[in-house]
Structure formats: structure tokens, C-alpha cells
Image (tube, rainbow, N blue to C red):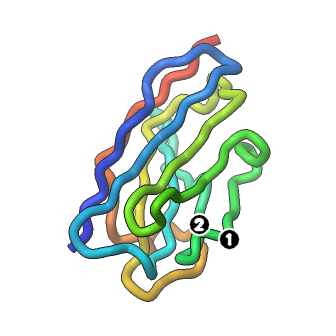
Amino acid sequence: QVQLVQSGGGSVLAGGSLRLSCVASGRPVTNNAMAWFRQAPGKERETIATIDWSRSSTDYLDSVKGRFTIFADDPQKTLYLQMNSLKPEDTATYYCAARGPGYGAISFRQHEYIYWGQGTQVTVSS
């Protein structure tokens, strides 16, 4: 089993930056693609950034391209989401997630992610 524990988030003014972290424990996630998602109140959850098992290939939702960066430090354990130039519309609960073992390709399909973090709130005020 894989446990994902998130940290970071909080409140920031528009234009500011935040970094989210997601630490994996239990079974290693070395062969698993991972991703960040977010869900704003009253809206569906959306995939915003995904990274492959090698941690070298990434893809982003258009609305966050150039502002957000997904990366891993110590690839087996910690995933990050660096968020710059934040906008009020980025306000949401953010989740990290991992695909199953051996599923290493990037994907925007939420149902393919089987391990989920607990979520962390990001609030951007104007």
C-alpha cells in the first residue's frame, strides 16, 4: 500500500507563490506516474499537472502552464508543485495522487490514479 501525505498550501495574495509537497511512504512509487489535481467549490476536480515514472516528462493543464511546475526531489518519495503568479481562480483544494505500480506514463485521466493524498487548501486573494 502507498500512503501520500501532503504539506504546504495556505493563503497568499494574487501574484504570490506557494509550494506543495507530497511524500510517499509504504510501497515505493518509483514506477508510478504521479499528478496534482485541484477542486474548487462547486466545481469538478481537474487534473493540473502530471509527471511520468522517470520524473523527466511532464504535462500541464493549459491554465497553469508557465506558472506551475511539477517536479520530484528524491524521486522515490517526494513530489512537489511549485505555484507562481497565483490567481484568485487558483483557489481550490489540491490533491496529489499516484498511478498503480508499473503504470508510469503521464495521464490526465483521474480514474487511473489509485493512491491519493489528503488534500490541502490553497486560497488566493486579490
Q: Residue at x 76, y 51 (%)?
A: 62
Q: Which residue is mark 1?
A: 57
Numbered tag placed on residue 68 in the rendering: none
Q: Residues within 10 Å of mark 2 (few under 14, many from 20)?
A: many
Q: Is residue 46 above or below residue 121?
A: below
Where is residue 81? Give x, y as percent.
55, 46
Q: Amino acid at mark 1?
A: Ser
Instruction: Tell me the quarter of the picture where residue 58 sits.
Output: bottom right
Where is residue 120? Give x, y as percent.
37, 37
**Horizontal placement of 1 versus 72: left or right?**
left
Q: Which residue is mark 2?
A: 51
Residue sitting nearer the eye, 67 or 23: 23
Q: Is residue 70 above or below residue 17?
A: below
**Horizontal placement of 8 versus 52: left or right?**
left
> CB of mark 2 within 8 Å of CB of mark 1?
yes
Q: Residue at x 73, y 39 (%)?
A: 67
